[in-house]
Amino acid sequence: MSAKAPIIVWFRQDLRITDNPALLAAAETGRPILPLYILDEESPGTRPLGGASRWWLHHSLESLAANLCERGLQLLLRRGMAQVELSRVVQESGAAEVVWNRCYEPGAVARDTAAKEMLCAAGVSAESFNGSLLIEPWKIETGQGAPYKVFSPYWRRLRELYQAPAFAELPQSLPAAKELMPDELVGWSLLPSAPDWAGGIRDSFSVGEAAAQARLAKFLDDTVVDYPNNRNRPDHADTSRLSPYLHWGEIGPHGVWRAAAAYLDKGGAVARGAEAFLRELAWRDFNHHLLFHFPELAVSNWRKHFDGFPWRDDPVGLIAWQQGRTGYPLVDAGMRELWHTGFMHNRVRMIVGSFLIKHLMIDWRSGESWFWDTLVDADLANNVCNWQWVAGSGADAAPFFRIFNPISQGEKFDPVGSYVRRWIPEIAGMPDKWVHKPWAAPDYVRAAAGLVLGENYPEPMVDHANARARALKAYKALRGEVD
C-alpha cells in the first residue's frame, strides 16, 4: 500500500489526545490520521451502557472531537458492531493500518481479537497498546507463574515492577485523512430528555480531558496531604473523584502515577498521602487483573459455594434501597447522592452494598446492575469485583461476617451528620446525637425537628441486630453445606 494510505486510530475507553499511546504511534508514522469512535452495543459479550455512562460518553466525545480538531483532525463517529463498522471504514478510507489501546473485559478481548484477525486477513496492519492500566494482566504474576488473587502481594510486586513510561508530546498539527460521512452524535440519543434527569450530574462534574487534568492537579495540591486520614469521610471533599475520568480514559493511569509520584519526594504527610493514593490506583489495576484472568467474575460468584446462598426475592426492598428509603440515614444519603450526581463516596458504596446484601439478603448482582446504570464511573471490572468483595464471594474478599452497622459507620465517618443532612433534608433538624438513628430519639426531639417517621421519612425497614443475625445464620448454614 501507499506510504500515504491513512492510519485509523480506533478510540474506545481512551478519550484523550494527551499521553495516548495509540495516537502517538499513529503520529510517528507520518500517515494521514483518521480518528474513529464506534458505539458498539451489538458485539457478543458487549454490555450496553447504563444511563449515566451514556450521558458522560456524549460529552466526552464532544470534548475529544474539539481537542482533535485543534490538531487538524476530525473524529469520525459510527454505530454498530465494531468488526463490521471497522471493516467499512477501512474500505471507505483505504487505510493501511489500524491502531488502538487495549480493553481488558472479556467481551472486549473477544471483539478485539476478532477485529485483529479480520484486519490481518484483509492485509491491513493492526497494532494495540496499553493506555489504560499500569501493568497489563499477563505481565504480573506470582512466583509460581499464576495470577494474583490477593491485593497486598499484588501491590508489593507492582511496586517492584512498575516504572511509568516517559511522557511524549503529541505534535501540535497532525496530517488528516480525507473526511468520511459521520454519524451525528445527537442522533445517538445518549442524553436523557423525557425527563432530563442529568442536572445533578452536570452540576457535579465537568467532562473531558482538561477537566480531568484540573481535578488531578487540585487534588494533589490541596487534598492529598489529608487523604489517608479523610478518604473515608463522606462529609469531607478529600477524595480525587478521578474514577470516571480514568474509566473513560480522559486521563491515563501513567499520567496520574507520574503526577502523584512527584509528591513522594516531598516527604512527611504529603508523601504518605501520595503513597496511599497510588495504592488505590493499583486497586483499580488489580480489579482488571482479576477480571481478565477470571472472566466469570462478571456474572458469577467467584467462590462457588455462594451459589447456594439463600438470596431473598424482595422487589419492594430493592426499590426502597434504590430510592434511598430504607430508614437508615447513611444508606439513604448514599443512594440519593448516587441518583442525583451519578457518584457515591467509596466508603458509602461499601456500606450501601453491605446493607443490600446482608441486611436485606438481596443478590449482589441486583446492586451491581443498579450501579451500572446510575454511576458515571461504571466500570465492569471495578463494579463486579468490588460488589463481590463486599459480598464475600469474590477474590480477596471481605469475609461475609463483616456486616457494616450503618449507625456506627455514620457516627464514625460522618460524626456531625453533614453528609446525611445534605442528602436527606427531612432529618436536617435532628441533633447530632440522633441524626444517624432518628427512630431512637425521644418524641419531642423528632417533633422539634419536624420529623414524622412513616410520613416524611421512613421507619427502618429492618432492625440491624435482627438482620445481622439472620444473615449470619444463613451464612453458617451455607458453610455447613460445604464443610
Image: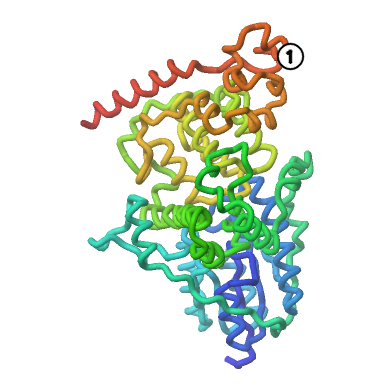
Q: Residue at x 71, y 81 (%)?
A: 172
Q: SS class of the residue under badge 1?
A: loop
User: Of residues 40 and 394, which is closer to you in this image?
Assistant: 394
Q: Residue at x 64, y 50 (%)?
A: 53
Which residue of the protein is positioned furthest toward the left in this rendering?
483
- The N terminus lies in quadrant: bottom right
- The vertical placement of 14 against 93, above or below, is above
Color encoding of the figure: rainbow
Q: Which residue is mark 1?
A: 450
Q: Amino acid at mark 1?
A: Gly
- The C terminus lies in quadrant: top left
Q: Is residue 107 visible?
A: no
x, y percent for residue 137 = 39, 62
User: Of residues 375 and 85, which is closer to you in this image?
Assistant: 375
x, y percent for residue 461 = 55, 17
- The vertical placement of 444 against 412, above or below, is above
Locate residue 71: give its quadrant.
bottom right
User: Of residues 243 and 124, which is closer to you in this image?
Assistant: 243
x, y percent for residue 335 = 61, 33
For residue 235, side relative to residue 107 (left or right): right
How crowded is the residue under tag 1: few (<14 C-alpha within 10 Å), some, or many (20+)? some
Q: Is residue 398 visible?
A: yes
Which residue of the protein is positioned furthest toward the bottom in this rendering?
2
User: Of residues 362 and 386, which is closer to you in this image?
Assistant: 386
